Amino acid sequence: MPDFSFEQALIDKGVTRIAGVDEVGRGPLAGPVYAAAVVLNPAKIPEGLNDSKKLGVGKRQSLCEMLLQDAEVSIGSASVAEIDEINILNASHLAMVRAVHGLAEPVDHVLVDGNRLPKDLNVPATPIIKGDTKSLSISAASIVAKIGRDAVMRDLAQQFPAYGWETNMGYPTERHKKALLDFGVTPHHRR
């Protein structure tokens, strides 16, 4: 289970504003990539934060609502056109940078899920491999990013119902792959 130890180590060194950052949507065939930056209030950390992939939809939704109420949250994204132009890794990093820069006030340090830091972050940062399972701030970011991207994919599914995006969120399921063969690509598919 994730804990607050990475954040506490920074707090012990005098760092006060710490954001956790995570992205969602690197693996799908369709849709944007999303990232969230979350600055937790140490006095109001919701119980049950974890990697968004390990939580059910209802639990993710209720945790997201608590985070929106009690933490500072920002979401960033990169479009399909940006993914096609700069590749998915760079687009993921662009979404992360946008999320961090979208926070109401600058942060002193960023904890980033993964083994690489976005080059344009311009803030002291620490990459944490599998950070969404280790850091509460990154877990919070993974939940907010997942809720945000899933909502976009459900909306897109209304326009393109054959692909099953309301359940597969653009990932390459059998239904999605069959729809690609039967109906071709949409403007929301990554090239």
Image (cartoon, rainbow, N blue to C red):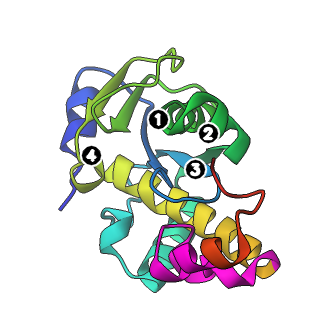
Q: Is residue 72 above or below residue 124?
A: below
Say whether residue 145 is visible: yes
Q: Quadrant of residue 6?
A: top left
Left or right of residue 21: residue 49: left
Circle 2 crowding by C-alpha within 10 Å: few under 14, some 14–19, many from 20: many
Magenta stretch, main secondary structure, is helix
Coordinates of residue 149 in the picture (x, y in percent): 60, 62
Judged from the image, the secondary structure of the residue bearing numbered disc 2 is helix
Q: Nearer the viewer, mark 3 or mark 2?
A: 2
**Which x, y percent locates residue 175?**
53, 83
Kindly identify the amino acid type of the residue bearing the numbered disc 3: Tyr
User: Above or below — where is 85 with respect to 188?
Assistant: above
Q: Which residues are magenta?
A: 159-179
Q: Nearer the viewer, residue 143 or 165?
A: 165
Tell me the CA gap for discs 2 and 1. 8 Å
Question: Foreground mark, 3 or 1?
Answer: 1
Amino acid type shown at disc 1: Leu
